[in-house]
Image (spheres, rainbow, N blue to C red):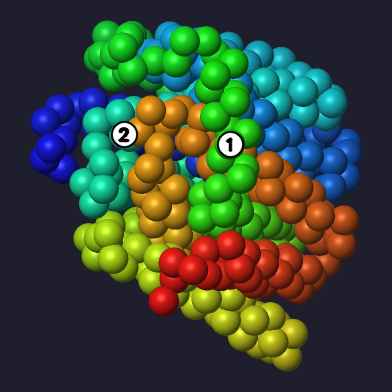
Amino acid sequence: MSSRPRHPARTILLGVLSAFGPMSMDMYLPALPEVASQLHTTSAAGQLTITSCIFGLAAGQIIVGPLSDRWGRKLPLLAGVGLFTLTSFLIPFTTSIWPLIILRLFQGIGGSAGQVLSRAVARDLFSGPQLGRFLGILMSINGIFPIIAPLLGGAVLSFTDWRGVFVILGAIGLILFLWTWWGLPETLPADRRTATGFAAFTQMSELFKDRPFMGYMLSQGFVYGALYVYISGSAFAFETVFHFSPQVFSIIYAINGAGMIVATQFAARGLNDQNGRKILGGSILTAAIASTLLLFGISQWPSGLLLAGGLVIIISLVGAVNTTATTLALGNEAQHAGAASALLGLGMNAIGGLMSPVVGLFGTRSSLPMVALIMVCEWIAFLLLVGLTRKTIR
């Protein structure tokens, strides 16, 4: 099967659907200090609005992914996008932190359908190196959103408050719902579906016993833990500690998003059946070493520019890790791509959700806790990858 998409519009749609995570968080990040101030709450409570969305993204995938192996991809996808749209339009009416946290949870559950099912659809259509290249295309489209989302969020904040960000997210959700309804066919034929939804959940339990799969899932999960530490802590680090404006922070965030696109493309183009594990291991090790050097440097010479420069390397490599780990993990799971994709999403979002609020517990007066947690996540990811896949990595 050719790796070149025959329907560019559908490829773009899948790429955008896979970006519900960046869309749900990155547009909102420049407003995070403002949310804490306007709702009269702490920075840690404000960061819980990120954490609840991440947990929603994780929990939703565990439900949607396996059920899509039974009912097909399109119906669960429409339900999820519809929920995302509804909650996005409700959030601007909140006046205190806890209703916002709860609605963000359901917003994440809705958005999870786009994340998990874009990967499952890709696996329905492709395999092997072709799958890797197609995922690279999707993740490059996905990677555009960390560039434009914070810039758009910063622009919105120049003429309105944080509530306007969610009005825009609701409008985007509505467009995606209609686009999916009219433009995306069902990719899982009836004869390839599981007999019941429970069969897919059983398959998930079997995947937990698969050491290489768990190695890819957990290493990717902890790399995403580092990413979500950065997502939760970077606005406070740059705006509160180093006194950068929300607009300058948005530009820095956009540069990191561009780096992820570049790393994604390099990984996808070099990916084949022999070197995928080497690319994955090398990317995680490089990020672990870079984060260690950044922690030492920032502790000796506190500087916003030094922090920004070090994070470019670390965050860019998330793109390479995402492409290779997803391709390797889904490679042997054609029949239960929904369940396998759900576990990958669980690893990324649950670990990210656990790490995200930790940085807030250390306060917002220093960037060191954020960098230290990123370093810890990267080294754990590398050790898990080597430990669980050591018989296959050379």
Which residue appears at 67% of the width and 21% of the height? 106
Residue 368 coordinates in the image, percent (x, y): 76, 73
Tell me the number on the disc at residue 206.
1
Which residue appears at 55% of the width and 48% of the height? 210
**First of labels 1, 2 by sequence position:** 2
Circle 2 is placed at which residue position?
Answer: 122
For the residue pair 303 and 57, the one nearer the viewer reads as 57
Does residue 10 appear to the left or right of 259 in the view shown? left
For the residue pair 125 and 84, the one nearer the viewer reads as 125
Tell me the number on the disc at residue 215.
none
Question: Mark 1 touching mark 2, by CB under 8 A?
Answer: no
Task: Check the image and report above or below for 58 versus 199.
Answer: below
Q: Amino acid at mark 1?
A: Glu
Which residue appears at 35% of the width and 33% of the height? 334
Q: Is residue 16 visible?
A: no
- Looking at the image, the residue that sits furthest to the bottom is 300
Quadrant where the N terminus is found in the figure = top left
Residue 168 coordinates in the image, percent (x, y): 49, 25
For the residue pair 97 and 199, the one nearer the viewer reads as 199
Does residue 154 appear to the left or right of 383 in the view shown? left
Task: Check the image and report above or below for 289 versus 325.
Answer: below
Q: Determine the secondary structure under disc 2.
A: helix
